[in-house]
Amino acid sequence: MSSKPETFTIWMKSLLMQTNGCTVFNKNGEIVYRVDNYDKKAGSNEVYLMDLKGNVLFTILRRKLFLFRQWRGYKSDGLKSKPQEPYFQVKICSEIFERDLSCQIAVRSSDAQESCYYKLEALSGKLAFKITNSNGEIVAEAKRKQSSKGVLLGDDVLTLAVEPHTDHSFIMALVTVYGLMHHKL
Protein backbone atom coordinates (compact mmCIF):
# COMPACT_ATOMS: atom_id res chain seq x y z
CA MET A 1 0.00 0.00 0.00
CA SER A 2 1.20 3.49 -0.73
CA SER A 3 0.05 7.04 0.03
CA LYS A 4 0.72 7.99 -3.62
CA PRO A 5 -0.67 6.61 -6.89
CA GLU A 6 1.55 3.86 -8.28
CA THR A 7 2.06 2.55 -11.79
CA PHE A 8 3.06 -1.00 -12.69
CA THR A 9 3.83 -2.74 -15.96
CA ILE A 10 2.21 -6.15 -16.40
CA TRP A 11 3.64 -8.57 -18.92
CA MET A 12 1.18 -11.41 -19.39
CA LYS A 13 4.02 -13.93 -19.75
CA SER A 14 5.92 -16.02 -17.26
CA LEU A 15 9.68 -15.66 -17.04
CA LEU A 16 9.88 -19.45 -16.79
CA MET A 17 9.92 -21.49 -19.98
CA GLN A 18 7.03 -23.88 -20.63
CA THR A 19 4.64 -22.17 -18.18
CA ASN A 20 1.78 -19.72 -18.37
CA GLY A 21 1.81 -16.71 -16.09
CA CYS A 22 2.54 -13.03 -15.76
CA THR A 23 5.31 -10.80 -14.45
CA VAL A 24 4.75 -7.40 -12.83
CA PHE A 25 7.34 -4.62 -12.77
CA ASN A 26 7.34 -1.43 -10.70
CA LYS A 27 8.13 2.02 -12.16
CA ASN A 28 11.88 1.32 -11.74
CA GLY A 29 11.69 -1.86 -13.85
CA GLU A 30 12.11 -4.20 -10.88
CA ILE A 31 10.02 -7.38 -10.65
CA VAL A 32 7.56 -7.09 -7.76
CA TYR A 33 4.97 -9.82 -8.45
CA ARG A 34 4.77 -12.95 -10.53
CA VAL A 35 2.35 -15.70 -11.35
CA ASP A 36 3.66 -19.00 -12.65
CA ASN A 37 1.09 -21.54 -13.75
CA TYR A 38 2.74 -24.92 -14.21
CA ASP A 39 -0.45 -26.46 -15.60
CA LYS A 40 -0.09 -27.15 -19.33
CA LYS A 41 -3.30 -25.32 -20.22
CA ALA A 42 -4.13 -21.71 -19.56
CA GLY A 43 -7.06 -21.14 -17.22
CA SER A 44 -5.88 -23.47 -14.47
CA ASN A 45 -8.07 -24.22 -11.44
CA GLU A 46 -5.35 -23.15 -8.98
CA VAL A 47 -2.65 -20.48 -9.34
CA TYR A 48 -0.41 -18.57 -6.95
CA LEU A 49 0.38 -14.87 -6.82
CA MET A 50 3.93 -14.51 -5.49
CA ASP A 51 6.36 -11.77 -4.67
CA LEU A 52 9.82 -11.67 -6.26
CA LYS A 53 11.24 -14.17 -3.75
CA GLY A 54 8.52 -16.73 -4.47
CA ASN A 55 6.54 -16.14 -1.28
CA VAL A 56 2.88 -16.91 -1.97
CA LEU A 57 0.69 -13.86 -1.34
CA PHE A 58 -2.60 -15.27 -2.64
CA THR A 59 -3.81 -18.69 -3.71
CA ILE A 60 -6.54 -18.34 -6.32
CA LEU A 61 -8.95 -21.20 -6.93
CA ARG A 62 -11.52 -21.47 -9.70
CA ARG A 63 -14.82 -23.10 -8.88
CA LYS A 64 -17.29 -24.22 -11.48
CA LEU A 65 -20.85 -24.47 -10.28
CA PHE A 66 -23.01 -25.78 -13.11
CA LEU A 67 -22.59 -23.10 -15.81
CA PHE A 68 -21.34 -20.43 -13.42
CA ARG A 69 -17.70 -19.77 -12.73
CA GLN A 70 -16.37 -18.24 -9.56
CA TRP A 71 -12.88 -17.48 -8.30
CA ARG A 72 -11.82 -17.39 -4.66
CA GLY A 73 -8.69 -15.74 -3.35
CA TYR A 74 -7.06 -16.95 -0.15
CA LYS A 75 -4.59 -14.50 1.37
CA SER A 76 -1.44 -16.17 2.62
CA ASP A 77 -0.47 -15.80 6.23
CA GLY A 78 3.01 -17.19 5.63
CA LEU A 79 2.02 -20.71 6.67
CA LYS A 80 1.79 -23.63 4.27
CA SER A 81 -1.89 -24.36 4.95
CA LYS A 82 -4.65 -22.58 3.07
CA PRO A 83 -6.94 -20.40 5.24
CA GLN A 84 -10.45 -21.75 5.69
CA GLU A 85 -12.28 -18.64 4.50
CA PRO A 86 -11.55 -16.87 1.22
CA TYR A 87 -10.36 -13.28 1.44
CA PHE A 88 -12.31 -12.44 -1.74
CA GLN A 89 -14.72 -14.00 -4.23
CA VAL A 90 -15.23 -12.95 -7.84
CA LYS A 91 -18.47 -13.70 -9.64
CA ILE A 92 -19.20 -12.84 -13.25
CA CYS A 93 -22.24 -10.56 -13.54
CA SER A 94 -22.33 -10.65 -17.34
CA GLU A 95 -21.35 -13.37 -19.75
CA ILE A 96 -17.65 -13.54 -20.53
CA PHE A 97 -18.47 -13.62 -24.26
CA GLU A 98 -20.40 -10.36 -24.06
CA ARG A 99 -18.60 -7.21 -25.08
CA ASP A 100 -18.89 -5.66 -21.61
CA LEU A 101 -17.58 -8.15 -19.05
CA SER A 102 -18.50 -7.21 -15.50
CA CYS A 103 -17.70 -8.95 -12.23
CA GLN A 104 -18.70 -8.44 -8.63
CA ILE A 105 -16.00 -8.86 -6.00
CA ALA A 106 -16.88 -9.50 -2.36
CA VAL A 107 -14.04 -8.92 0.11
CA ARG A 108 -14.19 -10.24 3.65
CA SER A 109 -13.67 -7.45 6.14
CA SER A 110 -11.51 -7.73 9.24
CA ASP A 111 -14.49 -8.35 11.53
CA ALA A 112 -15.62 -11.26 9.25
CA GLN A 113 -19.27 -10.25 9.69
CA GLU A 114 -19.49 -7.85 6.78
CA SER A 115 -18.08 -7.76 3.29
CA CYS A 116 -17.12 -4.81 1.15
CA TYR A 117 -17.70 -4.89 -2.58
CA TYR A 118 -15.76 -3.96 -5.67
CA LYS A 119 -16.59 -4.18 -9.35
CA LEU A 120 -14.30 -5.21 -12.18
CA GLU A 121 -15.33 -4.00 -15.64
CA ALA A 122 -13.77 -4.61 -19.04
CA LEU A 123 -12.77 -1.56 -21.05
CA SER A 124 -12.13 -1.28 -24.76
CA GLY A 125 -9.07 -3.26 -25.71
CA LYS A 126 -8.22 -6.91 -25.28
CA LEU A 127 -7.25 -6.94 -21.61
CA ALA A 128 -8.06 -3.39 -20.47
CA PHE A 129 -10.20 -3.10 -17.33
CA LYS A 130 -10.96 -0.99 -14.29
CA ILE A 131 -11.74 -1.84 -10.67
CA THR A 132 -14.11 0.39 -8.72
CA ASN A 133 -15.01 0.37 -5.04
CA SER A 134 -18.56 0.34 -3.63
CA ASN A 135 -18.71 4.15 -4.01
CA GLY A 136 -17.98 3.87 -7.74
CA GLU A 137 -14.47 5.34 -7.38
CA ILE A 138 -11.77 3.84 -9.58
CA VAL A 139 -9.10 2.13 -7.43
CA ALA A 140 -7.14 0.59 -10.33
CA GLU A 141 -7.15 0.71 -14.10
CA ALA A 142 -5.22 -1.34 -16.66
CA LYS A 143 -4.67 -0.33 -20.28
CA ARG A 144 -2.40 -1.39 -23.09
CA LYS A 145 1.05 0.07 -22.47
CA GLN A 146 2.45 2.83 -24.66
CA SER A 147 6.11 3.69 -25.02
CA SER A 148 7.29 7.20 -24.16
CA LYS A 149 7.05 7.97 -27.90
CA GLY A 150 3.39 6.87 -28.00
CA VAL A 151 3.92 3.49 -29.68
CA LEU A 152 1.53 0.80 -28.42
CA LEU A 153 3.32 -2.27 -27.12
CA GLY A 154 1.98 -5.82 -27.58
CA ASP A 155 -1.49 -6.93 -26.48
CA ASP A 156 0.11 -8.75 -23.55
CA VAL A 157 1.80 -5.66 -22.02
CA LEU A 158 -0.36 -3.48 -19.77
CA THR A 159 0.07 -0.40 -17.62
CA LEU A 160 -1.70 -0.71 -14.28
CA ALA A 161 -2.43 2.48 -12.35
CA VAL A 162 -3.31 1.90 -8.69
CA GLU A 163 -4.77 4.65 -6.53
CA PRO A 164 -3.34 5.57 -3.10
CA HIS A 165 -4.25 3.54 0.01
CA THR A 166 -5.06 0.45 -2.06
CA ASP A 167 -3.59 -2.97 -1.28
CA HIS A 168 -1.35 -3.72 -4.27
CA SER A 169 -1.29 -7.48 -3.67
CA PHE A 170 -5.11 -7.56 -3.62
CA ILE A 171 -5.26 -5.65 -6.91
CA MET A 172 -2.68 -8.01 -8.40
CA ALA A 173 -4.77 -10.98 -7.26
CA LEU A 174 -7.70 -9.47 -9.18
CA VAL A 175 -5.45 -8.96 -12.22
CA THR A 176 -4.61 -12.66 -11.92
CA VAL A 177 -8.31 -13.60 -11.89
CA TYR A 178 -8.91 -11.39 -14.92
CA GLY A 179 -6.05 -13.13 -16.74
CA LEU A 180 -7.56 -16.51 -15.84
CA MET A 181 -10.94 -15.43 -17.20
CA HIS A 182 -9.30 -14.62 -20.51
CA HIS A 183 -7.14 -17.78 -20.51
CA LYS A 184 -3.91 -15.76 -20.42
CA LEU A 185 -2.49 -17.49 -17.34
Image (spheres, rainbow, N blue to C red):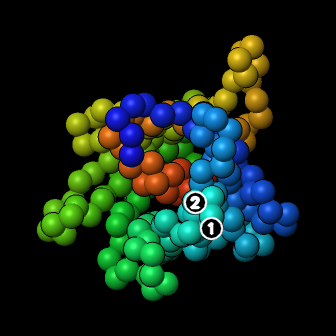
For the question of whether residue 167 can be seen, the reply is: yes
Q: Amino acid at mark 1?
A: Gly
Most distant residue in the right direction: 17
37 lies left or right of 134: right
| Residue nearer the viewer, 58 or 106 | 58
Q: Position of residue 57 (x, y in %)?
A: 49, 65
Q: Is residue 143 above or below residue 111?
A: above
86 lies left or right of 99: left
Q: Is residue 7 above or below residue 87?
A: above
Q: Amino acid at mark 2?
A: Asp
Where is residue 156, by image quadrant? top right
| Residue nearer the viewer, 72 or 171 | 171
> How many residues crowd mark 2 within 10 Å: few (<14), some (14–19), many (20+)?
some
Q: Residue at x 74, y 62 (%)?
A: 20
Q: Secondary structure at mark 2?
A: strand
> How many residues crowd mark 1 within 10 Å: few (<14), some (14–19), many (20+)?
few
Q: How far apart are the two marked residues, 2 and 1, measured between alpha carbons? A: 5 Å
For the question of whether residue 100 can be seen, the reply is: no
Q: Position of residue 181 (x, y in %)?
A: 58, 56
Q: Is residue 50 above or below residue 132?
A: below
Q: Secondary structure at mark 1?
A: loop
Looking at the figure, which quarter contains the C terminus?
bottom right
Q: Position of residue 145 (x, y in %)?
A: 67, 29
Q: Residue at x 45, y 86 (%)?
A: 81
Write down the residue under mark 1.
54
Write down the residue under mark 2.
51
- CB under 8 Å between callouts 2 and 1? yes
Number of marks in the image?
2
